[in-house]
Image (tube, helix red, strand yellow):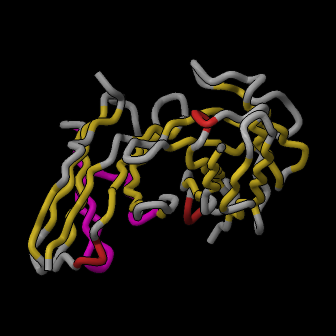
């Protein structure tokens, strides 16, 4: 099945620094990837849809200048949390669909997630 | 009305019992439905997908879909403590976007 790799798994940073999270599709090409955020004991919230070779589409209320998304290749999307603050501390999860897998059509595969703690 | 609704729980069942998780959705033209399991601190993992009305069984799991009632459920037979997790219902809507419900927390007590 499709595998999505996410790195780093954990990151702790000081307030005001920027943090980059990578999301890779290991055995398939993903023209579209999705970035979610999840606060403790809350549901997944879609932040943005990352489109290869074009600008990301952000959900309402998500600051595009705060959460920079780059999808420069068919297997890699990055999320950069700029000037992170404690309220940005959360679990960030990326996902992608393997459209080439007919047996798993429309199935969304998730990366393992990245837990960000901003001090 | 939320697009995908689930009871947040917690749903508590004794070990060995059947756990029944329910989900309703608002978009009548939705065609693809998924159940994901999420352990605390982990990302979601796919358990079942279902596309046609009726039941689909996979081991201890059975997904049930009723498009007329806009209802999808997940039954877990012989529940184990290791099944304790949050179960997320997800639906692909007319815009081809996957929308998640808020999740139901299941607790299986030994």
Residue A105: x and y in percent read 56, 56
Q: Residue placed at 33% from the left, 52% from the top?
A: B52
Residue A86: x and y in percent read 61, 37
Q: Is residue A71 magenta?
A: no
In the rendered image, which quarter contains the N terminus of chain B?
top left
Q: Residue placed at 80% from the left, 47% from the top?
A: A20
Residue A112 against residue A14 in the figure, above or below: below
Residue B59 against residue B57 in the figure, above or below: below
Query: As rendered, which of A13 and A54 lies closer to the eye?
Result: A13
**Which segment is the magenta one?**
B46-68
Q: Is A113 on the left-hand or right-hand side of B110?
A: right
Residue B80 lies in quadrant = bottom left
Q: Is residue B55 magenta?
A: yes
Please give the count of numbered marks on the rendered protein: 0
Q: Is B10 on the left-hand or right-hand side of B90?
A: left
Q: Residue placed at 40% from the left, 53% from the top?
A: B34
């Amino acid at each position: 099945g499709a595998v999505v790799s996410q790195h780093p798994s954990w990151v702790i940073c000081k307030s005001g620094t920027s943090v980059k999270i990578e999301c890779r599709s290991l055995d398939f090409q993903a023209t579209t990837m999705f970035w979610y955020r999840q606060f403790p004991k809350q549901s997944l919230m879609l932040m943005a849809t990352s489109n290869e070779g074009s600008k990301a589409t952000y959900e309402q209320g998500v600051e595009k200048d705060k959460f920079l998304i780059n999808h420069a290749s068919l297997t890699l999307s990055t999320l950069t949390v700029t000037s992170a603050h404690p309220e940005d501390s959360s679990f960030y999860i990326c996902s992608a669909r393997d459209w080439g897998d007919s047996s798993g059509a429309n199935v969304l595969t998730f990366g393992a997630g990245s837990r960000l703690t901003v001090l | 009305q939320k697009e995908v609704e689930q009871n947040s729980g917690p749903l508590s069942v004794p070990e060995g019992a059947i756990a029944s998780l329910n989900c309703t959705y608002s978009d009548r033209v939705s065609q693809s439905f998924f159940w994901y399991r999420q352990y605390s601190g982990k990302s979601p993992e796919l358990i079942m997908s279902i596309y046609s009305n009726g039941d689909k069984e996979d081991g201890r799991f059975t997904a049930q879909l009723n498009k007329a009632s806009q209802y999808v459920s997940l039954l877990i037979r012989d529940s184990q403590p290791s099944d304790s997790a949050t179960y997320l219902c997800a639906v692909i809507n007319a815009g081809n976007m996957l929308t998640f419900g808020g999740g139901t927390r299941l607790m299986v007590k030994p």
